[in-house]
Image (cartoon, rainbow, N blue to C red):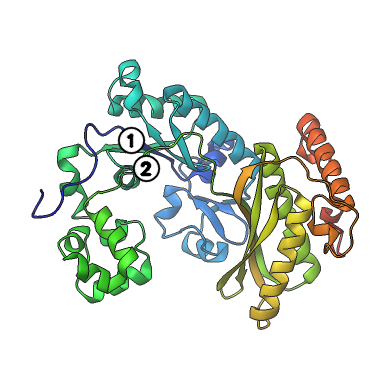
Amino acid sequence: MVGGQAAPMGGGAATILHADLDAFYASVELTRRPHLRGRPLVVGGGVVLAATYEARRFGIRSAMPIGEARRRCAGLVVVPGEFAHYAEASQRVFEVFRRFTPVVEPLSIDEAFLETAGVVRLFGPPVEIARRLRRTVREETGLPLSIGIARTKFLAKVAGRRAKPDGVLAVAPDEELAFLHPLPVEALWGVGPATERRLARFGIATVGELAALPPQVVEDLVGPALGMHLRALAWNRDPRPVRMGRHAGSVGAQSTFGRDVRDPGRIRQALLSVAERVGGRLRRKGLAGRRVTVRVRFADFVTVSHAVTLDAATASTSIVYRIADELVTQVTDRRSRGRGLRLLGVSVALLEAAPPLQLELALTGLGDPRRRAGSELGRRWAAAEAAADLVGERFGRGAIGRAALLPTRSRHPGA
């Protein structure tokens, strides 16, 4: 027991690593433009997607409008994002991870958990593995990597955040609560701005102050489910193992605009471009998904999401675009109130290994054939997309593309 409370779960050594590439998009751009190292730099178009630590010193953060970022830093360097470069860099980094341990659980393109318990005889204790891992990633990719080490996934991630930039922080089993309890309460997964404000009204500012409360008091403050969750984390109770081979929960992409956009043709063209990136990534990964979600940010930065679940999983750009177009139209019809758009995002979730194409019988009443992979139109689009993927792999992705994405095209994209 610790302070009258149940001790943290988990026994043995701290062997879970949380590896997180620092300012990933910006760091990749600096490997391509080394002459810009040391200068404040952001990646983005209408809004900031990533910022170097030099830029962050001016208060520049992700999702900030580029105009505001320029006002804060007169010498700011702005470069456009190119996801193909980030995907390639991510793949190289994850290949390094798997050379040290097969138990790697990706969290995103630039972040993963690694379990090192089974490889300490090969590579030494976890701290030494972390140091060698950082050194190898830096030598082979030029990218900085921060690593947190602990007995639980939750605490490893907290430690990783505090290891930034470009550091290693290990939390020994007998120091876990001494490390965790002085931290601000927002360090707990599940404490967002609203929950933080609610807890602050009752004088709860640190993890330790929340941990000291009786369970019923916490549940009364934030609800039973969240209350149980937060108290467990406050005592570092997190029994989840690192799971190898786990697929990302979704595949997505987004497009930002430098100014308010109201033109339906331009909106649909941007949406088709985003759907093309999502569909291509799904097919390259051999995945398909059943839930399509759109994210729409208006000119006043109010953001709305809308989703639909399909009967069958798809990786078709054309189907993803068609569904996304319908969802965006629904959002803008209901919520725009004359406001232009600043951001469009599309993601596909409920992922599975791409299934064989299920052909349809020629029946009536099945609905829009543009939304069905097994329709005659859907099969033709699938064949065209597969052929385009092959051309792109052989000659480069710029070798072939949809006419609807040409800059001079202004009519409704015919996906």
Q: Residue furthest bottom?
A: 337
Say above or below: 58 vs 2: below
Residue 165, numbered circle: 2
Residue type beneath disc 2: Pro
Quadrant hosting residue 208: bottom left
**Could one spot residue 270 in this view of the protein?**
no
Q: From the top left corner, tell me how far across and down residue 9 is, in percent.
A: 23, 44
What secondary structure is found at the residue carrying circle 1? strand
Between the C-alphas of marks 2 and 1, the distance is 19 Å
Say above or below: 121 vs 140: above
Say above or below: 296 vs 61: below
Quadrant hosting residue 211: bottom left
Point out the tag, 2 or 1, that comes first from the N-terminus: 1
Quadrant occupied by the C terminus: bottom right
Say above or below: 162 vs 130: below
Quadrant hosting residue 362: bottom right
**Could one spot residue 273 in this view of the protein?**
yes
Q: Residues within 10 Å of mark 2 (few under 14, many from 20)?
A: some
Residue type beneath disc 1: Ile
Q: Is residue 342 left or right of residue 372?
A: left
Q: Which residue is mark 1?
A: 16
The residue depicted at 67 percent of the width and 43 percent of the height is 282
User: 61 and 328: which one is in front?
Assistant: 328
- Give the foreground label among 2 and 1: 1
